[in-house]
DNA sequence: AGGCACCGTTCAGGTTGCTGTCAGATGGAC
DNA sequence: GTCCATCTGACAGCAACCTGAACGGTGCCT
């Protein structure tokens, strides 16, 4: 894979660059948004690793601009833990995953592999589940041919299920996936959102395993 | 599975304990090595999650002592990121795997599942018994092609049998695997649950050996 | 600036089903 | 036949979950 690293911290940048190379990928390293913008105009990347705090602007604005421009390259954002809601904001802006600084290089490699698996071997990340047609890259969804709109939070939850088909997800795991440490929820928010997905996608899409959590269900009659 | 968690950090301990329970296992939580030592003398665990830095000593020394004493219970060590040497030392001391703090709950669940399968004698999560198709990773079960739903407790019991095929399990052993110290049962609960499994899976799936216990049976006519 | 639509979250009350106990029935061993 | 290990149906308690509604914040439009 060809990876664009956008990170102004020289020490971290070198470590990440070296790990990417050690993993057998190629990497271009931009320390400013302007350089990143130049890079994506002249090269096709398989993945962008994007810091959120850069000397010439916010990584999120860069990402949003790329998405508006139709660029669907997978993006992993690099975010500090104490930046409230940056992770969700990043995901809302179109990021595919995130790494929380400080992260270790094993985790970096694992995330690159995971994102690569998701998109690298499958240039057209379309998923079909029952009567749902899902485009994970474009974040679009159709049910029986009709477009369904999910809010950012609904999409994040839905994606958690689709990324782990057949796996039972506890509510704590779902919460961990959807919220940062500083964003803890106090109520039955997960249940409410599961209910919302059911309302939009059908009552059997998500199966409750009482006392344990939820799992993507297969609607009756599906192959 | 019955799991012993040895962790002094209360916040992490609670999160891990709750996830273990959400995964359908039973758990005893010790915050000191001395308590862990007491626990392993009284109960048989399927897995130990072992922090390395404890208020009354090093987890590694506890592990070494257990191994010298002949205890082969699988152990996952919990180690901080900046103690890479501890990971290697842990593996050398006889640990089976490790988790690097901070770790997410998905990874915890996956590790527990992987270690549990490996030492259940069969690393393959897909098991076929008679007309039952079992996916131990996804917690799904089909009987003659039809999905069967088991409650958390039913699954835990069923899993105990599947992980020890052909082994006669006494009721006390079953109870020990299914319930932690704080969850002791008073009645004929094991019998009731065996009956529930039989109702869902067929009368011959579990064989009674009167006065001794139960064993996974092979349904008549199975290959 | 004000109004409105939308979104995320909480709240509160209703619904559901899981769990374990109990008591009587059944069946095996002697 | 007796004894007792095991099975089975029923049930109560409780907490996990669902659902409708309200509230506050945000962004957009006039």
Image (tube, coloured by chain):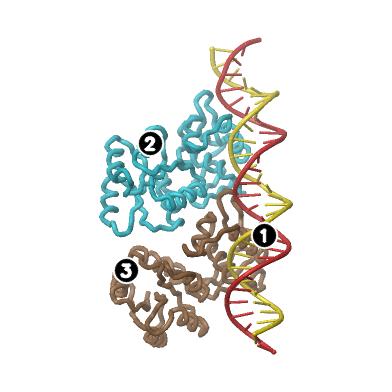
Chain colours: A brown, B cyan, C yellow, D red
Report if the CB atoms under discs 3 and 1 are less than 8 Å apart: no
**Residue ID for mark 2:** B40
- Work out whether mark 3 precedes mark 1 in sequence or the reverse, and give the earlier one: 3
The front one of A18 and A136 is A18
Q: Position of residue A74 (x, y in %)?
A: 45, 74
Q: Do the residues marked 2 and 1 share a common chain?
A: no
Q: Give the CA separation, mark 3 to mark 1.
A: 43 Å
Q: Position of residue B117 (x, y in %)?
A: 43, 46
The quarter of the rendered structure image containing the N terminus of chain A is bottom left
Question: Which element is circle 1 on?
Answer: loop
The front one of A97 and D15 is D15
**Which numbered marker is on residue A23?**
3
Q: Position of residue A161 (x, y in %)?
A: 54, 61
Q: Where D18 falls versus B119 (above or below)?
A: below
Of the residues tagged 3 and 2, which is closer to the observer? 2
* Image quadrant in which you'd find residue D1: top right
Q: Position of residue B134 (x, y in %)?
A: 52, 47
The front one of A17 and A121 is A17
């Amino acid at each position: 894979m060809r990876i664009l690293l956008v990170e102004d911290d020289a020490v971290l940048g070198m470590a990440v660059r070296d790990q990417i190379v050690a993993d057998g990928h190629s990497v271009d390293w931009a320390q400013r948004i302007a350089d990143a913008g130049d890079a994506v105009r002249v090269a096709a990347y398989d993945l962008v690793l994007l810091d959120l705090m850069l000397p010439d602007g916010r990584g999120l604005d860069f990402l949003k601009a790329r998405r508006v421009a139709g660029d669907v390259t997978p993006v992993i954002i690099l975010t500090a833990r104490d930046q409230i809601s940056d992770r969700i904001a990043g995901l809302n802006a179109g990021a595919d995953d995130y790494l929380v600084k400080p992260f270790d290089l094993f985790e970096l490699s694992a995330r690159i592999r995971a994102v690569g698996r998701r998109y690298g071997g499958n240039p057209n990340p379309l998923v079909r589940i029952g009567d749902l047609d899902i485009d994970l890259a474009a974040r679009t969804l159709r049910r029986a041919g009709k477009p369904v709109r999910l809010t950012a939070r609904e999409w994040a939850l839905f994606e958690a299920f689709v990324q782990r088909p057949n796996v039972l997800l506890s509510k704590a795991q779902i919460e961990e996936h959807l919220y940062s440490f500083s964003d803890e929820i106090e109520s039955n928010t997960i249940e409410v959102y599961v209910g919302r997905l059911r309302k939009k996608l059908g009552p059997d899409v998500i199966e409750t395993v009482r006392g344990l959590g939820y799992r993507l269900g297969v609607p009756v009659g599906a192959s």
